[in-house]
Image (cartoon, helix red, strand yellow):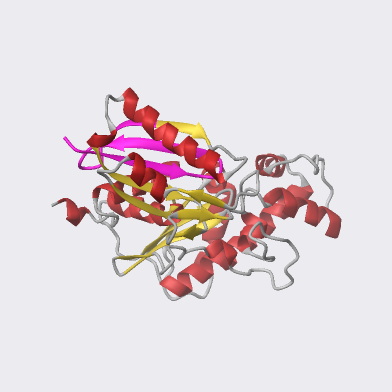
Amino acid sequence: MVWSVGVDLGATNLRVAIAGASGEVIAQRTLPTTQGPDGAAITAAVLDAVASLCADTGLSSEDIVGVGLATFGPLDMQQGAVVSPPNLAFPIEQIDLLGPMSTAYPDAEVTVLNDATAGVIGERFHAPTNPDNMVYLTISSGIGAGVCVDGTVLRGWDANAGEIGHIIVDPAQALPCGCGGAGHWESYASGEAIPRYARHLAETTQHHTEMPLETVDAAGVFAAAAADDQLAEAVLAGITGWNRIGIETIIRAYAPFIISIGGSVALHNPEAVVAPVRTAIERAPITTVPDIRLSPLGNEAPLQGAIAAAITDGTGDRRRLK
């Protein structure tokens, strides 16, 4: 029997799994993501999580033939590393992944890919019709997209294609982004940005609020909106507008049949995030409106894509299994 490892390194959670030759998962574990204080600590945590899961299932490093590692970006594929990620608690310069994982599992083919790219691979790998034109959009701590056009998953020369969260949606660039820019989609509608957006609207509008603005998080904003808080409702209306701009950009750039939305912000608040933007897009002057849906794989899409990449030479294409 041959075994592969899938890893999903997110800003909040680290997920690891061991799968058989066809992608069937035999063991899986979720841990909080180590935030620092440096990249070496995060690398060590990833290696420890994989080694621990292998040990618990009675596997040695020699038993692992493939490793798929999905991660937040940005990526430097020459070094096989994440460089200056914007959404961690500590300022991290570099997280080495490819080299350390290849050393730990010398008999395995190791593939490192952006987590949103892994998400679209996971969606296609498990979809009954395996759509050739689709986008996986994650709205979580950050915002990103995995894009498949005419059966080809777009990665870009540096593996950073699909960083759609960093398009400018606000020409006034009122809010900063963790990447150092301003006015980005991620500056307003990501989980990290929503509390900042609430404070911005509190300063620039007259909406009443009972929210503790200095300590409120994204979940608190959604809860307040459900309780008819005026400011929170304005925040969600604004988020719908920003999401519409971003998703219309995706539609016009890539013409997907399906946009599958994952990430904690969308998955935990589908009626507040996905439903209103779907309605707005359906009314937009677009020739072909795609099926805009919540990800059927939930928060497992990037992990499933990492597994698929591990067992199919990094492509996620089921035809490689035949």
Q: Is residue 129 left or right of residue 175?
A: left
- Residue at x-position 73% and y-position 61%: 175
Q: Is residue 298 above or below residue 168?
A: above
99 or 280, which is in the foreground? 99
Q: Position of residue 241 (x, y in %)?
A: 64, 63
Above or below: residue 128 compared with residue 300 = below
14 to the left or right of 177: left
Foreground residue among 62 and 280 = 62
Residue under the image location 49 percent in, 32 percent down: 31
The answer to whether residue 143 is left or right of residue 312 is right
Task: Report if residue 24 lies within the magenta region.
Answer: yes
If the image is split into quadrants, where does the N terminus sit? top left
Name the spot of residue 243 as percent of width and height, x first.
59, 61
Horizontal placement of 221 versus 295: left or right? right
Residue 129 showing in the rendered view: yes
Front-most of 308 and 82?
A: 82
Residue 205 seen from this side: no
Give the magenta part as a residue range. Answer: 1-28
Q: Position of residue 22 (x, y in %)?
A: 21, 42
How many numbered badges does the structure rendering display?
0
